[in-house]
């Protein structure tokens, strides 16, 4: 069954302007469908089978967009904020009209993998507590992380509000004595997404996270060629992997 949409909605969604601007393009005879100039910007068209031209360009319609962002510190994971810069401000103009939003949150000072999309169904699938989608982080922790901590995390630890976390997998990569004190480098995989969860888990065992970076979410792993603030679209394989997470 063919899916039709209003022409002005399709053009707005693909970056050809506001509804008012699109009406002006139509009035000037600069929009055609299947080779015929159209007079009604609200007409129903099928973006998959109809050939749409606007202002001399062929319209390539995409309903959903999926971006992998290497989030830098200093940005909040929100679509708007009155005090801080948001991750959407890192995107180029070609993505502004898609109404993207971050899937989940990374703290303002946290780096790493952040998925941006306009696919609400997939976002819900990744964030619903019932799915327990795994998220893996690299962290640098003040103090020596011990085997006792690893065992505590494996069983679940009690946070400052009394919540007991689901079992998590803690890998101690390295611990060293520095001039500034003791430092441990770890990887932690959690299966939920409570507020400041990684930091609060280490606080529960008397330690402090001094650097935090998300490496993966479900089957999606941060592309290590992306520098801080850079992003790219997901491949079809990555998108399918997320749907199967």
Image (cartoon, rainbow, N blue to C red):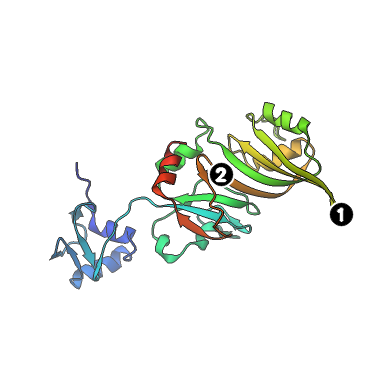
Query: Cα distance, mark 2 to mark 1?
Result: 32 Å
Q: Is residue 156 visible from the viewing direction of this image?
A: no
State the residue position of label 2. Answer: 216
The spot of residue 74 in percent (x, y) is: 63, 59
Residue 60, quarter of picture? bottom left
Q: Is residue 143 left or right of residue 45?
A: right
Q: Is residue 160 left or right of residue 37?
A: right
Residue 17 versus residue 201 in the image, above or below: below
Which tag, 2 or 1, sits closer to the chain's start?
1
Q: Residue at x 19, y 54 (%)?
A: 45
Residue 112 versus residue 34 in the image, above or below: above
The spot of residue 185 in percent (x, y) is: 73, 45
Q: Are marks 2 and 1 in contact (CB under 8 Å)?
A: no
Q: Residue at x 50, y 32 (%)?
A: 131
Q: Residues within 10 Å of mark 2 (few under 14, many from 20)?
A: some
Q: Give the structural element (helix, strand or loop) at label 2.
A: strand
Q: Is residue 91 visible from the viewing direction of this image?
A: yes
Q: Is residue 236 left or right of residue 77?
A: left
The spot of residue 64 in percent (x, y) is: 37, 50
The spot of residue 214 in percent (x, y) is: 60, 47
Considering every residue shown, the one lying at the far left of the view is 36
Considering every residue shown, the one lying at the far right of the view is 179
Q: Which quarter shows the N terminus?
A: top left
Considering every residue shown, the one lying at the far bottom of the view is 28
Q: Give the structural element (helix, strand or loop) at label 1.
A: loop
Q: Residue at x 43, y 36 (%)?
A: 244
Which label is found at residue 179? 1
Residue 98, quarter of picture? bottom left
Q: Is residue 78 left or right of residue 164?
A: left
Q: Residues within 10 Å of mark 1 (few under 14, many from 20)?
A: few
């Amino acid at each position: 069954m063919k899916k039709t949409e209003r022409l002005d909605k399709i053009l707005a969604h693909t970056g050809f302007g506001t509804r008012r601007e699109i009406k002006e393009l139509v009035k000037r005879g600069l929009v055609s469908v299947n080779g015929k100039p159209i007079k009604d910007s609200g007409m129903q068209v099928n973006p998959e089978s109809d050939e749409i031209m606007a202002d001399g360009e062929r319209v390539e319609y995409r309903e959903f967009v999926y971006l992998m962002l290497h989030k830098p510190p200093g940005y909040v994971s929100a679509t708007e904020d009155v005090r801080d810069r948001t991750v959407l401000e890192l995107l180029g103009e070609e993505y502004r009209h898609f109404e993207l939003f971050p899937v989940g949150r990374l703290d303002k000072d946290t780096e790493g993998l952040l998925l941006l999309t306009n696919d609400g169904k997939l976002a819900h699938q990744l964030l619903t507590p019932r799915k327990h989608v795994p998220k893996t982080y690299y962290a640098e922790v003040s103090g020596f992380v011990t085997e006792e901590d690893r065992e505590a995390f494996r069983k679940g630890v009690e946070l400052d509000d009394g919540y007991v976390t689901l079992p998590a997998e803690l890998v101690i990569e390295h611990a060293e004595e520095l001039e500034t004190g003791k430092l441990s480098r770890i990887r932690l995989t959690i299966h939920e997404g409570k507020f400041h969860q990684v930091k609060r888990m280490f606080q529960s065992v008397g330690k402090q996270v001094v650097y935090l970076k998300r490496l993966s979410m479900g089957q999606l792993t941060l592309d290590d060629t992306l520098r801080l603030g850079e992003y790219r679209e997901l491949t079809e394989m990555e998108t399918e992997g997320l749907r199967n997470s």
